[in-house]
Image: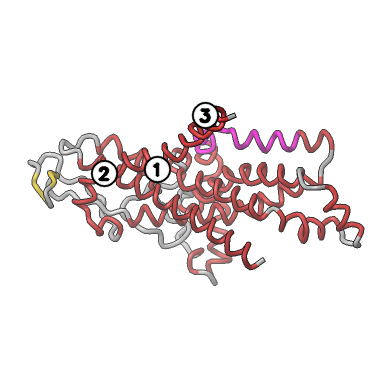
Amino acid sequence: MFRFRWTVGILAAFLPLSLIAIAGFLLQYSWPAIRFNGLGFLLHNNWNLGSMYGNPITVNGEMVLPHANYGVLFLIGGTLLSSLIAIVLALPLGVLSAIFLSDGLRGMARTVGSFLVELLAAVPSVVYGLWGYVVLIPFLGHHLYPFLAETLGRFIPIFAGPTGSGYGLFTAGILLSLMIVPLITATLRDALVASDAALRESGVSLGASRIEVMRKILLPGQRTVLVGASILALGRALGETMAVLMVSGNALNILPKNIYDPVSTMAAFIVSQLDSAMQDPTNMAVRALAEVALLLMLISIIVNAAAQGLLWLSGRRA
């Protein structure tokens, strides 16, 4: 028993240790970029690799190319806004889908529906990106966005035009929501199916309808599961790469003025810029990308901590 406990403990320790190791590597590798960029890295929108044909110069004790400048405010905005749109769209759809699969279907229909939802979660992101490029972008650009600009744009400034060609913030958010809905649905559905049958029977015996039992008894009891599923889904949205790269427009050095403007996210930007960054003989551009990765990791940790804090506060109030 003692050996088993120690073995399991050592294996479980690999997870937090791997997180610490990754964070330590990113901090160590990006430290020259952190020294060079300072706080301005977070506050401006000028990502410039510098003159590739100039002789390296020394700035703040680091060798960089002339006119090199790195600012990621536009990446922070694109990442947070696209993920926010994704979770706002995905959360109600995922909850309703989970309720339907757990309480609205029976037997083979539930099995088939659950299998299809789990299959959606297993589809590679590049497949979603290709579908978004071929199907979603033309539909949104030619039909939905002009309609939104003509109706909602009169009252809500962020929906006003120009609508562009279909690439942009809202497109990335919609595609991300389709990718994370299966995570929320599958997790919450399993929890609802596993709920004690006595809870349902007690609610029905008191005269509550099936909807009231679900809304007032079963769902409040799955608050922790729902928060955990939402964190998992938001984590995927924050770190999604190829799908976002294919539909977001990959904008550089600009913040979106409406939901149709092209954007770039941190993860997608790292992929798109890595090849050109490797041409920097001082290696500062690659280190700056490592700083972007470190910042993305910190944002993910902060989001997770905030969600856990909200869950703790709601538990105390209850």
Q: Quadrant of residue 88?
A: bottom right
Q: CA distance from mark 3 to mark 2?
A: 35 Å
Q: Position of residue 61 (x, y in %)?
A: 11, 49
Look at the magenta stretch and give its main secondary structure.
helix
- Residue 256 highlighted magenta (yes or no): no
The residue that mark 2 highlights is: 30
Q: Is residue 105 left or right of residue 75?
A: right
For discs 3 and 2, the disc positioned in front in the rendered view: 3
Name the element at disc 1: helix
The residue that mark 1 highlights is: 268
User: Residue type at mark 1?
Assistant: Ala
Q: Which mark is residue 7?
A: 3
Write the start and end of the magenta stretch as one range. Answer: 112-130
Residue at image coords 42%, 40%: 19
Q: Earlier in the sequence, mark 1 or mark 3?
A: 3
Q: Is residue 53 left or right of residue 153?
A: left
Q: Position of residue 222 (x, y in %)?
A: 69, 53
In this figure, which colouring scheme has been used for the structure?
A: secondary structure
Residue at image coords 33%, 57%: 73
Name the element at disc 3: helix
